[in-house]
Amino acid sequence: WELTTERAASGVYSIRSPDLGLDNITPFTSNVTFFTNPAWNDGTVVYSVLSGVAMPYDDLILYVDGVIRDNLSNMVEFETKQIQVGPGAHQIVWSYRFNPIKLAVMPPLPNSHIGAAFIDDVYFLPAGFTSAPSTGPPASLPVPGTAAPTIVVRPPTAPPTDQSPISVSPTPPLAPTTIAPTSTPPEALYYDGFERGTFPSDIEWSVAGDGLWELSSERATSGVFSIKSPMLIDADDTPTKNANVTLSTNPTWGDGTLYYSVLAGVNMPFDDLLLYVDGELRAELSGMTEFQ
């Protein structure tokens, strides 16, 4: 990480993650660590971040005392974040990872991808203060008592192995149409717009976890139905819950591309949506307000 004038939340300077470029796709990790003063009491670490990263190219993970507290990605401008900490010394680490899932070939970059993370305006507010410092000490205001939860990511349940393959003859796959079809789009091997209302009993789909994905007419990219993650918030205060939906492709298919539409209306540290392909993390989907 280094000092830069490329972007800043305020003033001229910020710090920036390193840039090795896409000519070298060797995976690497680069950390920057902020050590709090052991004499400080409890309070809040505030910082501004522009994390112009996205899986599978790169990501930015926030650790507090060795525990993952946030996953920062897909930003186009600086955002202000808070970390509540107890008294004493703490280590706050921003870990930039390039090619974290070790791809041999990178997919084409989207135009919006910045490919770097920037951090600016880092300060510590003792309990009882909430205003950002300017030239003097912060104003005295009550501090909210909401603590950031610890995040633990669990891998998904493995696809079922006791199901018969779908009987479809392979043909060259193409992108599905943008209109909700009533049958398989031309030239595609498979399509499911969930309009038949048979999910999750379809042989290629399976659900598992602390709650089950279900058919929903609440939102849809086309037609009437989509599938929706369960509401896992309840009174038992379980810190981490997980719900998986799995699509098992036909083993007779050749190589090709799987298209899907997704609205991931989730945000860390509350919830997230991870995409795994054959057990490997391929994307982290969050912060959406419409289908993509």
Image (cartoon, rainbow, N blue to C red):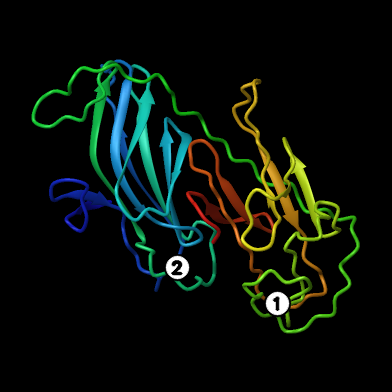
Q: CA distance from mark 1 to mark 2?
A: 23 Å
Amino acid type of the residue tagged 2 in the rendering: Ile
Q: Mark 1 against mark 2, which lies toward the viewer?
A: 1
Residue 255 disc label: 1
Q: Nearer the viewer, residue 155 or 139?
A: 139
The answer to which image quadrant residue 24 occupies is bottom left
Above or below residue 120? Residue 219 is below
Residue 253 appears at what percent x and percent y?
78, 75
Residue at the image position 40 percent from the left and 19 percent from the top: 145
Question: In the rendered view, does 247 fall on the left or right side of 22?
Answer: right
Residue type at mark 1 is Asp
Graded by Cα atoms within 10 Å as few (under 14), some (14 to 19) or many (20 or more), the crowding at tag 2 reads: some
- The percent position of residue 9, horizontal first and vertical second, equals 22, 47
Q: Is 113 drawn above or below residue 231 in the view shown? A: below
Name the N-terminal-most of marks 1 and 2: 2
Report crowding for label 1: few under 14, some 14 to 19, many 20 or more residues within 10 A (C-alpha): few
Residue at numbered disc 2: 25
Residue at point 44%, 53% (across, down): 59
Compared with 76, 244 (above or below) is above
Mark count: 2
| Dots 1, 2 in contact, CB < 8 A | no
Q: Residue at x 70, y 80 (%)?
A: 173
Secondary structure beneath dot 1 equals loop
Q: Residue 254: which quarter of the image?
A: bottom right
The x, y position of residue 91, in whole percent, is 36, 31
State which quarter of the image contains the C terminus.
bottom right
Q: Is 123 situated left or right of 163 in this image?
A: left
In this orientation, which residue lies closer to the viewer: 88 or 203? 203
